[in-house]
Amino acid sequence: MRKLTQAEVVARFRSNDLEVLEPYQGSQTPILCQCLKCNYERRAYPHSVFAGCRCPNCANQVRLTQLEVAARFEMRGMELLGEYINNDLPILVRCKQCRYERRIKPNFAGAIGCPKCANNLSLTKADVVERFTVNGFKVIEPYRNTRTLIRVRCIKCKYERRARPNHIFQGMGCPNCADYGFQPSKPGTLYYVRVTSPFGDPLYKIGITNKSVGERFGKDFTKVTIIETWHFEHGAEAFEMEQDILKDYDAHRWTGPDVLESGNDELFIRDVLGLDKGQGQIELLNVKPGNLCLKRVKGEAKVAALAE
């Protein structure tokens, strides 16, 4: 049988995701090679590779030393705490940045990172309560995950709203308490706008501001078309109206990626008030002093009403 050339051997190894690192001597002589996927080096019999044998490290079949495993975790920002047995048995490690400890299989073929640092950690009920409490909020409905809207109450001022947990976990505070946010004691504007979305159909937003709508949105104003505004001497009334509308149309809230720099929790996937393009009309009615409500003049009978 003809002996293969070096080029032929290289091509056969590469077809099995291996790179030849030294001259070929024969199919029964081990040769140094490196995996093209994980860079693991070893000596392999060419006849085994020609028969389809690939990288044992990618297949979790390599018995590493304790020092090798520790060094690989070190490169990924983790400290090895337990004794390595093999790639199939979970081993205790600790994140060097946040000190979070967990057990993980020492499989280095794929990406290994800290789920807590990546904000992908599954939280217990106690973890959720603690995180909200630390940030000044009380949870008043069941928690599902970091992206699903949840109703919370400010521990300080008792202001209730729906917010994404990940926003609060990242330090977003109560807008009612913040000096830079909406001030219920000052005159306010309730606005309804159409928002251009990069994800398809336009979205609709209800919101409140002590400023003009243009000042409220800043550079995001190019994405916004004002449909209607209502002005209140007491911003608290605008706030109550906003909350009623958010509650009434909660099923139509946007839950996708952020579209605006702020206020994404008050976006709707459709024109819930029916005011765009003349589909309906809304007027502000003063039912009783200090008890305002929005009534539909044409279209659905009711939009929102404040409790007496």
Image (cartoon, rainbow, N blue to C red):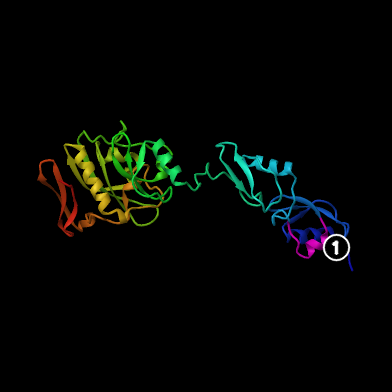
Q: Position of residue 171 (x, y in %)?
A: 41, 37
Could you say which is closer to the camera, residue 169 or residue 276? Answer: 169
Q: Where is residue 112 in the image (x, y as percent from the top left)?
A: 61, 47
Q: Residues within 10 Å of mark 1 (few under 14, many from 20)?
A: few
Count of labels in the image:
1
Where residue 26 sits, quadrant-wise, is: bottom right
Could you say which is closer to the camera, residue 119 or residue 54? Answer: 119
Could you say which is closer to the camera, residue 257 or residue 223? Answer: 257
In the image, taking residue 228 as reference, residue 171 lies left or right, namely right
Q: Does the magenta stretch include residue 102?
A: no
Q: Where is residue 216 in the image (x, y as percent from the top left)?
A: 29, 39
Q: Where is residue 116 in the image (x, y as percent from the top left)?
A: 52, 43
According to the image, label 1 marks what residue?
A: 4
Q: Residue furthest front?
A: 126
In the image, taking residue 75 as reference, residue 147 lies left or right, namely left
Q: Quadrant of the N terminus?
A: bottom right
Q: Which amino acid does label 1 sit on?
A: Leu
In the image, taking residue 125 as reference, residue 177 lies left or right, namely left
- Residue 44 vertical placement versus 158 (above, below): below
Where residue 68 sits, quadrant-wise, is: top right
Residue in the image at 73% along x and 60% along y: 16
Q: Residue furthest top?
A: 179
Q: Quadrant of the C terminus?
A: top left
Could you say which is closer to the camera, residue 282 or residue 291? Answer: 291
Q: Give the range drawn in magenta.
A: 44-55
Residue in the image at 85% along x and 55% along y: 30
In the image, taking residue 77 as reference, residue 67 lies left or right, namely right
Q: Residue furthest bottom?
A: 1
Q: In what element is the residue under mark 1? A: loop
